[in-house]
Amino acid sequence: ELGGNVKGMFALEYLLFGHKGFPGIETPNAPLVLQMLSGKNSQRRRTYLLAVARDMEAKAGQLAQDWTSPGEQGAAAKFAAGGQATVNLLVNQLAHAIEDAEQARLNFVLVLPKPISGQLYRIEASPSGTSLQGVVAYLEGMQKFYRGAGGLGVADTLKQVNAPLAKRVEEHFDAAISATKSIGEPLEQAVVDKRDAIQNACDKVHALEILFKVDLASALGVTISFTSGDGD
């Protein structure tokens, strides 16, 4: 509904794997990639697949260039020049992303109506079987942003202000990532036979979210300004 230029990887995933469990589709598994791309009337699909892939490549390249650009126009220089305002923005974005990981990715699969087999198409990355890997990568990416590089991360600032809290945040990050990895199988499968493991991961990510929104924000003088979707 949002379009390939917004959904990016998931538009590619749909073109390669189709949907699983989409209402009205009787087959339990998506067609093979070869069938999707070489079957009758597949030229249009191949053309669109290349267009979306090239668009993503161009945008990823521009993003990489922006972040590695030196001098006053580089991302690091702009961040430092922004002072407290950029710290506020980064902490808010990280807190929002942590909430999204818990609410829109993990808890989401637990509240899907039954039968689950008819809801699989609503789980991002389920057609390719990478739904769990996606959540883990999402959390690990947040941790990298939090840590920064070369002593420029939020983690380094927090250590100077409140070293014990900085240690707790690292522990909560590690616990959230570990619990999510421990699910051990794609979310569309785990929601059937490992619901307790998903709930445990939800709890760990939620604890990290609260630590970010309350303790960390207070220690760094940050006001959480985005509208929370979970009431916290």
Image (cartoon, rainbow, N blue to C red):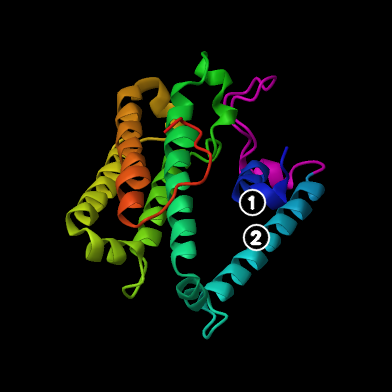
Tag count? 2
Residue 160, image x, y percentages: 23, 66
Answer whether residue 225 is magenta in the image: no
**Looking at the image, is mark 2 or mark 1 earlier in the sequence?**
1
25 or 90, nearer to the observer: 90
Outermost residue, bottom side = 71
218 with respect to 141 (left or right): left
Asked whether residue 184 is in view, the answer is no
Q: Which residue is mark 2?
A: 56
- What x and y, as percent, mark residue 155? 30, 62
For the point 33% across and 25% down, the residue is: 194
Q: Residues within 10 Å of mark 1 (few under 14, many from 20)?
A: some
Q: Is residue 150 above or below residue 192?
A: below
Q: Which residue is rendered at x = 31% and y = 73% of the image?
A: 151
Residue drawn at x 70%, y 19% is: 24
Picture disc at residue 55: none
**Contact flag, marks 2 and 1 (Cβ < 8 Å):** yes
Query: Could you tell me residue 181's position as x and y percent?
Result: 32, 42
Span of residues in magenta? 17-41
Q: CA distance from mark 2 to mark 1?
A: 7 Å
Above or below, 167 against 207 in this view is below
Name the one closer to the observer, 232 or 1: 232
Identify the residue position indicated by label 1 in the image: 8
The image quarter in which residue 133 lies = top left
Residue extending furthest left? 164
